[in-house]
Amino acid sequence: MSGKRKSKLGIKQRYSMLTRGLGWDTTYQDMDKVFPYDNYEGIIIHDWDGWEDPFRLTMDAYWKFQSEKEKKLYAVIDSFAQNNGHLGITDARYVNALKLFLTGVSPLEYQAARGFTHVGRQFRGVGPRVACQMQAIDELRHVQTQIHSMSHYNKYFDGLHSAPHMHDRVWYLSVPKSFFDDARTAGPFEFLTSISFAFEYVLTNLLFVPFMSGAAFNGDMATVTFGFSAQSDEARHMTLGLEVIKFMLEQDERNIPIVQRWMDKWFWRGTRMLALVAMMMDYMLPKRVMSWREAWDIYFTEAGGALFADLARYGIKPPKYADIATKEAEHISHQAWHIFYNYTHAAAFHTWVPEKDELDWLSEKYPNTFDKYYRPRLEYLDKEEKAGRRFYNDTLPMLCQVCQIPMGFTDMDDPTTISFEVSEYNGDKYHTCSLGCRDIFDYEPAKYVQAWLPVHQIYQGNCGGAEVPDVLKWYNFNLGADNLEYNGSPDQKLWDEWQAHRKKA
Amino acid sequence: MSVASIGKYEFEPLDKVENFHGNQLTYFNWEQHLLFCAPVCLPLPPEMPFAALVQEVLPGVYNKHPDFQKINWDEVTWTLDQADFTPDMGKSLADNGLGHKSLLRFWTPGLDGIKGSHS
Amino acid sequence: MSRIVSITLQNNDDARPIIEAIEKDNPEATVNIYPAMVKIDCEGRLIIKQETVEELLGREWDVQELHLSLVSIAGNVDEEDDYFELSWNV
């Protein structure tokens, strides 16, 4: 079959000419001055040409395929809006997952665009520079298409109106925001290890794949389409993550301990952030595809196991505390949902107690933990809510200095006792939620003492006022609509009206 | 370890005690009562008597829990910053050894939460 | 320990011939169907051959068209003019 094609350059040669062939070593200025940031982290590179580009995508092919993806995506978005696609979702509770996505995840795509634009300038090797520049454009595309897709829901549902503003201010959004701030303020190699490897390669499947499949299962065509459209770029991003790791490890053995430490750090930071995704999957999808526990088994234990077996030849070990994270898969979604249930009066989305068949599903999926630790509490909360005493926690929580999540996670060997860790630095105490977060603090305390912890900022008077309503106004919340319990919310009222109309029709 | 950086790396911590208008941050946790999802954080004057903490502050935080009224405060056990601790109710928080960002945990024997689930 | 490589594709018209080609060229592969997507797992190694996809599709097919349907992968990538391969080092 190959004979019938016009003879032209093979993919490898074409790629090489259109990337490396366009680079040069500077002569008027020393290369170290032109690329001043790619060696201060301690990573030693002997030969930038040792970089292997797994996908040999040249810029012309990149534009061609990206424009095709965009055309497909916008056809779906248009058709979704024209056909009132929001009426086809399984339940209005589902939209709350989109609210969390738009305020928590989409701004990270923009942060990623900024991060990759920066490192795409700073590497002296042409291969990684081109890969980072393409990824920067991808990330910009992701944030734009996500806003476009979800703008349709914003016409009808609350809490979707001020995502960038909220991302910079709201307490739980400081969790993803600080994650990316941490990555972007590191050097270029740590940035790629954190975002491209730990987040995209090891963990992003847990966000996009089962969750987007869940969106499909719940009738949300727009989200599935932007999700998979973004994800088709993600496979390329993942290979960048794996390549940067192999490149660093192959270049010099002194790189190994640095890379291992970054993997340990960013794996842990990533798992903490994914607690939000865990609860989206177990609690916020009215029709469920798989439990968080099952997703963890497939995408971390199985896929991650094969990956780290592959990296073992370089002397790399699986991330520290991976065993704890695996134990957490039995608990984390329930504990995270409970945090938001406690503080949903201060959140821009609704929470609720799952319905009986949903509780039964959780019992079935979590036979070791759900009935023992979580179901009695949820049934009590349900009873209180139905009796007109919806439980809210009126006092602001203690936060972890590193992941910034309220300290609601327990010791995994003692799931009724909160896990506490503390460090001292220059005479002050710094509390963390886990050994993983404590190690991160202890390695770079000078970085994490600068953490903008929302609760502490509120008490310092930097967030709009002393009372909770002042703070929520500063967050730009529409009080009584964006926040509080789902039952009785304007979202629910509207949804019930639509369902009643549908029945009548 | 110091931060690998492109220049001098020294910054002020954001949560120094001077930033809290005369108060210090105190964290509390009522153990085995996870209806309250996490420990709480409050800015309190260091000169506040410990008794006021028990009689005025903690009820405001925890009295929504059906176990709260049943607490026998004479039987409560405490830790302060992870060490066993017996508060002197008449003394101030500072004189009891509570500093900025101290963690106070308390256990209420015989009370094990909603349907014994430690919630 | 199992060394599974994996490719996830959208479950749509563009991807179906690719999925079929994978099944044909990798008889030991397992196909898992989820809402909107298909995840194919294979021990050690998995190949997509241009020739097989073209036969099924009845037209010329550029291996890089794979990008339009791809959702996720696990394994080291080797992309050539006439094949796309995932593998773990043994």
Image (cartoon, rainbow, N blue to C red):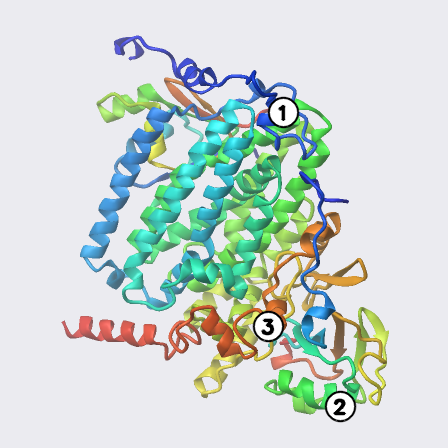
| Closer to us: A361 or A469 | A469
Q: CA distance from mark 1 to mark 2?
A: 69 Å
Could you say which disc has been placed on residue A32 in the image? Answer: 1
Q: Secondary structure at mark 3?
A: loop
Could you say which disc has been placed on residue B72 in the image? Answer: 2
| Amino acid type, mark 3 | Gly
Give yes or no for contact between labels 1 and 2 (Cβ–Cβ under 8 Å): no
Res C24 seen here: no
| Amino acid type, mark 1 | Asp
Q: Secondary structure at mark 2?
A: loop
Q: Which residue is mark 3?
A: A461
Q: Chain of mark 1?
A: A
Q: Are marks 3 and 1 on the same chain?
A: yes
Q: Secondary structure at mark 1?
A: helix
State the image coordinates of residue A253 (x, y, percent, origin top left): 72, 26
Residue at image x 84%, y 83%?
B87
Q: Quadrant where the C terminus of chain A lies?
A: bottom left
State the image coordinates of residue A379 (x, y, percent, origin top left): 51, 78
Asked which quadrant contains residue B32, the reply is bottom right
Q: Are marks 3 and 2 on the same chain?
A: no
Q: Is residue A356 left or right of residue A276?
A: left
Position of residue A291 relative to residue A255, above or below, is: below
Asked which quadrant contains residue A273, the reply is bottom right
Q: Is residue C79 left or right of residue A203?
A: left
Q: Is residue B10 left or right of residue A304?
A: right
Q: Quadrant where the N terminus of chain A lies?
A: top left
| Closer to us: C56 or A283 | A283
| Amino acid type, mark 2 | Asn
